[in-house]
């Protein structure tokens, strides 16, 4: 694969070529606006740049210029205006490539991340659930958690379901919603794509247990399969390591030993040590011996055992016998 083809697939390589082309002084100024992780990754990419042919250099600079120009058009007149100008200048195909690239690197609703969640709630709580779901998909999980907790109960589950089922939304619709909310909030600008089960899991992990239960109960009635998939991801087997010792000891007494044995087959060494530490010495030694002599098992059996253990954890939490730390609620564990 040639260097030029690699550049078409690797944004970090393109950024490295751009900075090398711009020179040390300008690159140093750009570094001031990056995170430590971004600086490390970019410096590594720059160190791997041995030589840059003129064609590649011109290609990267031209692409950067077009993206910067497109972003300026969007800030002045919105997505439709930018698309119209770019189509006249470059043709419809090239214009769409630039718009798609821009919407993949600029997150929508950035301006709302500067606003207080209560302020956002005031302006979106009367919107259609699909609009609320779209907005919450792009906010930080902590913001979305606080907002969804304050919505009416019948709307909470509907919004959670729409977030989970969301895939892609056209840039034009996102731009229209942004424009309307920007006028309401009277703050800055920006915008791109998200949604899906992982997003709603992030949101639910941040709400209090009462809100989570209410949403999941409604989802169970509306879409049982979706509710089950969300439940699986809300607390993963490896998250046991975050429980306090008393909760782990209570769990060990409750779970089936066969399930515990199967689940340890693929558990991390750290989690194994935490579990062994919270059971009797005899039980730990017995499990270690059985693990040593246990033959191959199907991964499906292991995952099913883990799921049963996670279900036990959720039942114990519902009964108030263990506590899973959450960022919602009063946040105090005694």
Image (tube, rainbow, N blue to C red):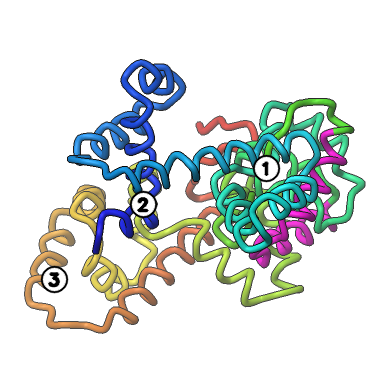
The part of the chain drawn in magenta is 153-182
| Earlier sequence position, callout 1 versus callout 3 | 1
Q: Which residue is mark 2?
A: 10
Point out residue 69 in the picture as x, y percentages from the top left corner.
63, 37
Name the mark on residue 291: 3
- Looking at this view, name the residue that lies furthest to the right: 126
Name the element at disc 3.
helix
Name the element at disc 1.
loop
Name the element at disc 2.
loop
| Mark 1 residue crowding within 10 angstroms, few (<14) / some (14–19) / many (20+) | many
Point out residue 202 in the picture as x, y percentages from the top left corner.
56, 49
| Mark 2 residue crowding within 10 angstroms, few (<14) / some (14–19) / many (20+) | few
Q: Quadrant of the N terminus?
A: bottom left
At 16% from the left edge and 66% from the top edge, which residue is drawn? 287
Q: Which residue is mark 1?
A: 191
Q: Is residue 167 magenta?
A: yes
Q: Is residue 127 above or below residue 91?
A: above
Q: For this rendering, which residue is in front, 147 or 237?
A: 147
Q: CA distance from mark 3 to mark 2?
A: 44 Å
| Earlier sequence position, callout 1 versus callout 2 | 2
């Amino acid at each position: 694969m040639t260097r030029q083809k690699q550049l078409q697939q690797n944004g970090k390589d393109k950024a490295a070529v751009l900075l090398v082309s711009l020179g040390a002084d300008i690159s140093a100024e750009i570094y001031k606006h990056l995170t430590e992780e971004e600086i490390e990754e970019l410096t590594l990419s720059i160190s791997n740049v041995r030589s840059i042919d003129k064609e590649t250099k011109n290609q990267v600079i031209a692409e950067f210029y077009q993206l910067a120009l497109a972003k300026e058009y969007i800030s002045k007149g919105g997505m439709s205006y930018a698309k119209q100008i770019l189509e006249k200048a470059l043709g419809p195909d090239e214009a769409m490539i630039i718009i798609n690239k821009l919407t993949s690197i600029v997150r929508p609703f950035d301006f709302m991340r500067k606003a207080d969640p209560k302020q956002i709630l005031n302006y979106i709580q009367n919107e259609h659930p699909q609009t609320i779901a779209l907005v919450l998909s792009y906010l930080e999980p902590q913001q979305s958690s606080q907002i969804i907790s304050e919505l009416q109960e019948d709307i909470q589950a509907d919004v959670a379901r729409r977030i989970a089922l969301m895939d892609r939304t056209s840039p034009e619709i996102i731009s229209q919603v942004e424009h309307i909310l920007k006028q309401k909030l009277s703050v800055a600008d920006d915008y791109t794509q998200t949604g899906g089960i992982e997003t709603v899991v992030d949101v639910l992990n941040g709400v209090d247990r009462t809100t989570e239960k209410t949403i999941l109960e409604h989802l169970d009635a509306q879409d049982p399969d979706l509710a089950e998939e969300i439940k699986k991801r809300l607390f993963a087997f490896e998250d046991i390591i975050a429980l306090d010792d008393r909760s782990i000891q209570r769990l060990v007494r409750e779970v089936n030993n066969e399930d515990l044995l199967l689940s340890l087959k693929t558990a991390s060494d750290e989690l194994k040590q935490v579990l062994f530490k919270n059971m009797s010495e005899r039980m730990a030694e017995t499990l270690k011996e059985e693990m040593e002599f246990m033959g191959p098992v199907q991964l499906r059996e292991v995952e099913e055992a883990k799921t049963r253990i996670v279900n036990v954890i959720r039942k114990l939490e519902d009964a108030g016998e263990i506590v899973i730390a959450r960022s919602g609620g009063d946040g105090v564990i005694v």
